[in-house]
Amino acid sequence: MPLRRKDQYLEHLAKVPLFSALSKKELQTIARASDDVDVPKGKVLVEEGKPGHEFFLIINGNASVKRGKREIAKLGPGQYFGELALLDRGPRSASVIAKEDMEVLVLGQREFAGVIDEVPSLAHKLLTTMAQRLRDADARAYSH
């Protein structure tokens, strides 16, 4: 894969809150563990209510996020979904469908576990990031 392409992946990965505290080298480890996948228009990437196993980062194309039959969001290049599936196999909170042909970077739960085993310091950074997100979510919940 061309270097410029890899740099684009790293740029996108660095913007994912779960990975925001990681070094360039750690992001490269995650990029190497990920697969670059072409997705045809209309394909269901994740299905609401089904257990999740992968994280998706959109490189090119657009997707529709639906709860039930209602579109609740649109996602495009640089956006992502499914990061919590890397940590547990909980049910997907929404369906995501390709609105056009897409290119996505996919990181599976097993590959992610391998990255954690390979780079133990990564786990500490990820836990710190998750704790901050949980703290923020709690603060929002109590402020209403």
Image (spheres, rainbow, N blue to C red):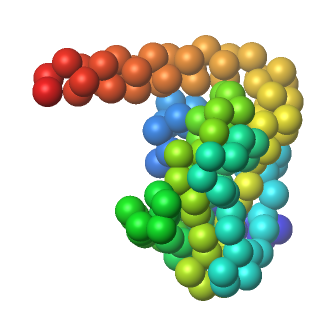
Image coords of residue 75 (percent x, y): 47, 67
Front in this rendered view, residue 61 or 82: 82
Seen from this angle, which residue lies furthest left?
A: 144
The answer to whether residue 92 shows anywhere in this view is yes
Residue at image location 33% in from the left, 26% down from the top:
137
- From this viewpoint, which residue is outermost toward the front? 68
Residue 118 x/y as whole percent: 84, 25
| Residue 90 % position (x, y) | 65, 33
Q: How many labels were placed on the picture?
A: 0
Question: Considering only vertical position in the picture, is 94 above or below 132?
Answer: below
Q: Quadrant of the C terminus?
A: top left
In the rendered view, tell whether residue 131 sits above or below residue 16.
above
Residue 120, picture quadrant: top right
Is 31 or 38 nearer to us in this picture? Answer: 38
Residue at 58% across, 59% down: 95
The N terminus is located in which quarter?
Answer: bottom right
Does residue 7 appear in this view? no
Q: From what the image shows, is residue 75 above or below residue 55?
A: below
> Closest to the observer: 137 or 50?
50
Locate residue 38: give its quadrant. bottom right
In this orientation, which residue lies closer to the viewer: 138 or 77?
138
Q: Name which residue lies at 65% across and 56% down.
A: 47
* Residue at (78, 51) in percent of width and height: 34
Q: x%, y% of residue 66? A: 48, 63
Relative to 44, say whether 27 is above or below. Answer: above
